[in-house]
Amino acid sequence: MGGGGERNSMGVLVPTVNAGETSAPAGAETEAAVVGTEVVVVTERVAEEEEEEEEEVDKDILCPICMQIIKDAFLTACGHSFCYMCIVTHLQNKSDCPCCSHYLTTNHLYPNFLLNKLLMKKSARQMAKSATPVEQLRQAIQQGCEVSVKELDSLLSLLMDKKRKMEQEEAETNLQILLEFLQCLKKQKVDELNEIQNDLQYIKEDINAVEKRRIELYRTRGRYSAKMRTLVDDSSAMTVRPPLRDKGSGAIVSSPVNLQEQGRAGTSQTRNTDTRAPQNPQIVQRKDDNQGGSDSQDPNQPGKSLARKRRVHAQFNELQDCYLQKRRYWARQSQKQGERVANIMNRVGYSAGLEDFQSVLSTFTRYSLRVVAELRHSDIFHSANIVSSIEFDRDDELFATAGVSRRIKVFEFSSVVNEPADAQCPIVEMSTRSKLSCLSWNNYTKNHLASSDYEGIVTVWDVTTRQSVMEYEEHEKRAWSVDFCRTEPSMLVSGSDDCKVKVWCTNQEASVLTIDMKANICSVKYNPGSSAHIAVGSADHHVHYYDLRNISQPLYIFSGHRKAVSYVKFLSNYELASASTDSTLRLWDVNENVPLRTFKGHTNEKNFVGLTVNSEYLACGSETNEVFVYHKAISKPAAWHRFVSDDQNDPDGDMGSFFISAVCWKRDSPTIVTANSQGTIKALVLAA
């Protein structure tokens, strides 16, 4: 029992040994182990007691007022110690001891020299415990520690060796960092040099190709001029010189005098066309083709060439980047696909990259916007004439307008272009209960038109009967956008200020799908090649690209705009354009999930100014009452047109008071129909 009691009292620190089962040496080792263990236990207990005593001492040296270690200790007549500042501050308000409430004034305070000395020693011990070896050595020397000269020499030698070693390591590290930097810089510059050399080689090849092409054209023109002179000499022998007809082409060939007269007549006709609003687009196109002749046939050609050169120099950096980008891309494609493809590309004498860039350069520098028709509402000064949306039908024969006037008006495009401005009337007009925000024609059913309004109602109209086919009223706030699917004619999508995107089917009375987002929806658009993918422009500054088969999260989120995304439009199945009130347009690749380009030049900070696209161009409005057209390969405007204010009393009104509110391309055509906040609608053609 006694042995068991000892085992229990010692616990795991003292191992139990049966004396009858062990030999004498083993017992001696066990006894030594027990003694050693007891020494350890005693040492630990002493250390714990010292720590407890230090804690108690620490409590004794705390100031009863601030509960911190006493600084500049002063003793009261009643025997209590305080920080001098603490007790003095206390006695300014009261006249008693904070500990015992004994009457006390500043005259009863005395310095506690003993306590201050103890506190200084304690502070020194604590600093010594927490100090580094170097600090301890410094303190020992400063306190006058006795060290012999030999020991100091040894210590100094050791320190010098340590210093030299550290300096060498630091120098090696600095050199290593410098070497790595120089190597990286060298690699970067070598890569840049190789790229510049490759670019220079491309430029030399393209210069040779262009010069060769120019020589061929010059020789062709020389042969044509010689043939012309021969024909003129032959016709000079005739008494009556009727116009000659070229047998090869069937074209009429006139004398030089007649050519000059025709040139002057053509110039006069051009000026008259610009002043008269109605023109047939086919006639305009034929006239533009005639203007594309040689310099000798068009007196204005040198002026046009000079203007195009000025535009090249003004946008040289942009064009340079475009050229190099296309040249490098097609060079990589040729390397991937082999020389066979490269040779096919070069059959016309140009590389594929040069041919691609030439099309961009010619269209960017050649075209400008011209007015071919103008349509005005009856009261141009009434705010209810603001047009929010313009859309062409599937055949580009009709276009519909809608806005805050609560009316949908359908016009025949050919009539608008060919008839005088004061005789143009809509062929169909439909009234609605609320202001309208957006229109969308059905791509299959020609007479079906969808609209969204400020009450959140999405309506499908039959333009032939002028009646609504379906009305959807699930949106709780203003619906900004609606769009029919091109590949599935019964499907349409809408977005609203209630932060919801809804997908509808014309065969059902309720929505078939709802996407609940965190921000207002400004624009929605179906991918033209898919019924499962939509783009959503949101007030959260992002473009969200959804796969409707999985709406738990967007397929991609395109970030870059700094303000609300007001419009989204598809140039192709993989190219998406977006407009924002940060005065920029952006182009995205929805297949690769990458930004392609940012377009700047227009002003858009407060209003929805419209966005329209085709396969090559983007057009948008501006709060400067202008329409801007961008080529998708160049970030600066290619052409623009300013609406002139009709308010004669406000000559600056077109700059500040009015803005472009809607734009729409006529598909597969250089024609744009656009409207401003005055209610003026213009048809513009992008022509040379």
Image: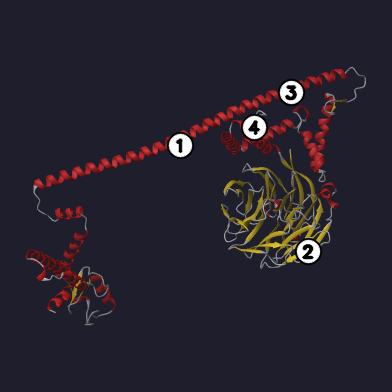
Frontmost of labels 2 and 3 is 2
Farthest residue in the left direction? 24
Question: Which callout, 3 or 4, points at the residue further toward the start of the chain?
Answer: 3
Q: Position of residue 138 (x, y in %)?
A: 18, 53
| Residue 40 percent across, percent down from the top left | 14, 66
Which three-letter amino acid code belongs to the residue tagged 1?
Gln
The numbered mark, 2 or 1, whose residue comes first in the sequence reads 1
The image's mark for residue 631 is none
Q: Marks 4 and 2, how far apart in space?
A: 52 Å
Q: CA distance from mark 1 to mark 4?
A: 32 Å
Please state which of residues 677 and 444 is positioned toward the viewer in this rendering. Answer: 444
Helix or strand or loop: what does disc 3 sit on? Answer: helix
Quadrant in the picture for residue 28? bottom left
Q: Residue 135: x and y, percent?
A: 20, 54
Pointer 1 or 3: first along the chain: 1
Residue lying furthest front: 21
Measured along the vertical axis of the image, is residue 618 above or below residue 389? above
Q: Which residue is mark 4?
A: 345
* Location of mark 3 (residue): 220
Residues at marks 2 and 1, CA–CA distance in whole angstroms: 64 Å
Q: Secondary structure at mark 2?
A: strand
Name the quadrant of the N terminus: bottom left
Residue count near mark 3 (Cα–Cα under 10 Å), binned few <14, some 14–19, many ≥20: few
Amino acid bearing label 3: Thr
Element assignment for label 4: helix
Tell me where residue 488 sits by quadrant. Answer: bottom right
- In percent of the image, x 16 and y 75: which residue is there? 9
Viewer-nearest of discs 4 and 2:
4
Q: Which residue is mark 1?
A: 188
Relative to the observer, which residue lies in front, 362 or 248?
Answer: 248
Identify which residue, 70 or 544, lies in the foreground: 544
* Residue 619 location (% of width, % of height): 68, 48
